[in-house]
Amino acid sequence: MALDHIFASRAARMKASEIRELLKLLDRPGILSFAGGIPDPNLFPAQEFAAACSTALDPAHAGQALQYSVSEGYMPLRRWIVAHMAQLGIEVSVDNVLITSGSQQALDYLGKLFLSPGDTALVGWPTYLGALAAFNAYEPRYDRLTINDNRAPGDIAQAAEAGGGRVKLAYLSPDFANPTGETIDRPGRERLLDLAETLDCAVIEDAAYQALRYDGDDIPPILALELARKGTIDACRTVYCGSFSKTLSPGLRVGWAVAARPVISQMVLLKQAADLHSATMNQMAVAEVADRCFDSHVTTLRDTYRARRDAMLTALAAHMPDGVTWTKPEGGMFVWLTLPIGTDAAALLQRSLDTVQVAFVPGQAFFADGSGANTLRLSFSCADEATIAEGMRRLGQLLRDA
Ligand code: PMP
């Protein structure tokens, strides 16, 4: 029975994208896929997790592992995160840390916490599709988050008011963003903080790929820069969203949020209402594995993904025709291609699957305003170097023919 006539108004914003439908075709045998933005499953620390799960389920720990637990999260894991954040220049206490079911859950909670219908969320053009999906349920309008031009904050605030709300948050992934692979430099992060101060809005710092840097120097997180300005985390407007998905395992769904205590307290209430807490067993396993081998494991990931990134950039330079440009990421999983204006990357994907059997994600879905038809995202995380070279050769051929 169709019940859509009694769905809440927010359901109108929650549509399956055409892209996701197209991506279902990509499992066909023979397709060289650079579409999925997922970690290489061959690199999961499976043995370490087997040992950690076995410990969690031994008679001394099983009662805790299989029991309900507190919404804030498993204390040894929160302590590990406090130490991890300190290495990034962010001194906080466990009271500033909430464990979430992936950073995706933090994005949902932050949308719920900050956005009333008609409020404005500032996002990149393009931005992470999952952030748009999370925020959409709270019926915001979107405006373009620009860090490198000089659009007056007053104009942004005025447009938000004309839209029936105000600017509540600026969302960005400053390191090796999904989908572009780009990184915001330190002056850009400082300018963003200035903008957030002027607009009096929250900053959501999505650090999903932060640990996966392949060259260049680390840049302090936005929260670290704000902390240096304000002296105390509890005066900061930045919410840092971290994740173990790209480093240890996405399937266990363990991430975290770090923020001022009043924000974390609200998020704890949201979590109580939504799912009580993230799986105790998973938090225990992640705490154990992170303790044992986080740094060494991340070093292995960096070495492997760096070689794949290099293979992709080399092959793009060799095979792409004139008029195609692409980003040169210092980390993460993605390279972003811009095709000549007028090219439709979604139509190109269809043709690519039918002819050269190469898959990528057309870029349009990453734009809140539906622009960007001539862009596409390539992921280098799951293919070996030879496959990447062959895939880029085929894609170059297709683009030349087009
Ligand atoms: N942020 C970004 C930029 C991502 O690419 C992803 C996953 N693709 C997430 C957040 C969500 O990751 P998770 O919920 O697994 O932590």
Image (spheres, rainbow, N blue to C red):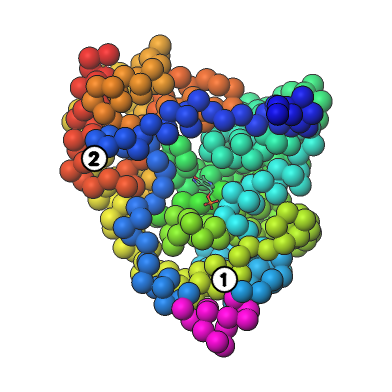
Provide the secondary structure element on which disc 1 rests: helix
x, y percent for residue 270 = 76, 54
Residue 255 appears in the rendering: yes
* Residue 167: assigned label: none
Q: Which residues are magenta?
A: 54-65
Task: Say left or right for 29 vs 148.
Answer: left
Name above or below for residue 101 compared with residue 113: below
Kind of residue at badge 1: Met
**Sequence order check, earlier mark of 1 and 2:** 1
Q: Quadrant of residue 337?
A: top left
What residue appears at the point 59 percent right and 49 percent down from the top-left corner?
A: 104
Give the image location of residue 242, x and y in percent: 56, 57
Q: Front-most of 273 and 62? A: 62
Q: Is residue 317 left or right of residue 327?
A: left
- Which residue is pictured at 53% across the width and 38% down the height? 128
* Up-down relation of residue 285 to residue 362 (above or below): below
Q: Quadrant of residue 63?
A: bottom right
* Disc 1 target residue: 281
- Residue 64 magenta: yes
